[in-house]
Amino acid sequence: MTATAEKPAEVGAIPTMTVTLKIMRHDPDGLDGREPGTDYWEEFQVEAHATDRVLDALHKIKWEQDGTLAFRRSCAHGVCGSDAMRINARNRLACKTLLKDLNPAKPIQVEPIKGLPVEKDLIVDMEPFFASYREIMPFLMTSGPTPERERLQSPEDRQRFDDTTKCIMCAACTTSCPVFWTDGQYFGPQAIVGAHRFIFDSRDEGEWDRLEILNDKAGVWKCRTAFNCTEACPRGIEVTKAISEVKHALNTGEI
Amino acid sequence: MAPAPELKAPKKGISHSTLGRTQRWSWIFQRVSGVALILLITIHLTVNLIMGDGINQIDFAFVAGKLANPFWQWFDFVMLVLAMVHGSNGMRMIIDDYARTKWMHATLQWALRIATVVIIVLGTLVLFTFDPCPAGADASLLPSFCEGI
């Protein structure tokens, strides 16, 4: 009796496929005979699994094909918020976007997030974004002596601002906002989310200082409720709702 | 490494008196006037185009008849002012967003303000000084109440 040893089909094997990534590149130095500061599209083909993420494909490009490709990423698991980019014309985190969800039959377009100055390829200067965040004073403001133990809060009070605590400051919302694109002065959705997190915190006493800032020319009244921010948020924060709650607090004077 | 950006000292002692800013009132006006305009324009279109003989009824006599009635004068006046201010307020925000240079911004804003005022003044003049029975006109084209004059 001889058993014919046939190679069994691998159980649970994931088929690979070839995907094309069309990347918007920006060359600040002018290499390979380009003018410094040239923007150009470049296509790359990579072998990938359907379950791979866009970040995996970018890694393959950077590690195996073109080491000059520049993009940010840190944790690579949707927590740090470093790799927000415009993928197929929508702001997403490259580390949370699966290739199979993007119709890999067509080239996948990857661009830097809009409205912030591009430094190289997919890396933008985040400073204007962080400056807006600093404007709204994102720290606990209290009066009176510091308690020896934690500042306690009821679960209901915590629930009031739970949604906006999820923000990872990836800038996907702010750079999807049409007012932010054109205006250049608007705080942007993220700063308002950051303010919301403290304004509706029962332990914080700086709410009117923050509301005063958001009542300003570049504040919440610039919002046109386009809902781009809510759609873009990789953490599922209802950004437009948070902005409307700030508007409501300003209109009624109640928090 | 660049040094960490400096934090501004928090502003202190701000009261609720800041609630009266123009940006906020412009936002509230836009919402309130929007709702009012939906109502006014729906009535306007219904009365003019659907009720009675519909679209065929509109001629000089019909319009003159309406404008001789103080109710329709004031109705049209409210609609005119709300529509113009609502529209120009929206245009103002668009100019704020898209006019990059100072010169362009100022020019467009002033053009908008002047156009708004001129149209409101002209419209109001027409509404309140309109003569429904011009002398020497063909009586068949005039509203019926002109016969007694």
Image (tube, coloured by chain):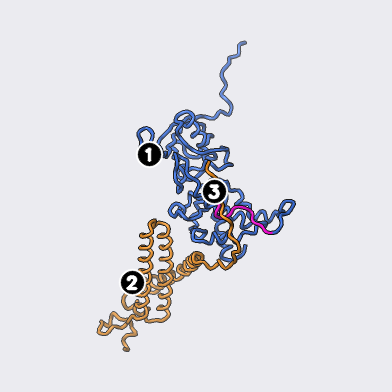
Chain colours: A blue, B orange
| Residue at position x 31%, y 75% in the image | B59
Q: Nearer the viewer, mark 2 or mark 1?
A: 1
User: Residues under labels 2 and 1: Cα distance?
Assistant: 66 Å
Helix, strand or loop for disc 1: loop
Q: Chain of mark 2?
A: B
Numbered badge on residue A36: 1
Which residues, given as a range, are shown in magenta?
A: A134-143
Residue type at mark 1?
Pro
Residue type at mark 3?
Pro
Residue B31 location, x and y as percent? 49, 65
Residue at numbered disc 2: B56
Q: Main secondary structure of the magenta part?
A: loop
User: Residues under labels 3 and 1: Cα distance?
Assistant: 29 Å
Q: Nearer the viewer, mark 3 or mark 2?
A: 3
Q: Nearer the viewer, mark 3 or mark 1?
A: 3
Quick check: do tags 2 and 1 share a chain?
Answer: no
User: Residues under labels 3 and 2: Cα distance?
Assistant: 70 Å
Numbered badge on residue A241: none
Q: Chain of mark 3?
A: B
For the residues labelled 3 and 2, say whether their Cβ atoms are less than 8 Å apart: no
How crowded pointer 1 is (Cα within 10 Å; few <14, some 14-19, many 20+) is rated as: few
Q: Give residue A106's quadrant in the image.
A: top left
Residue at numbered disc 3: B5
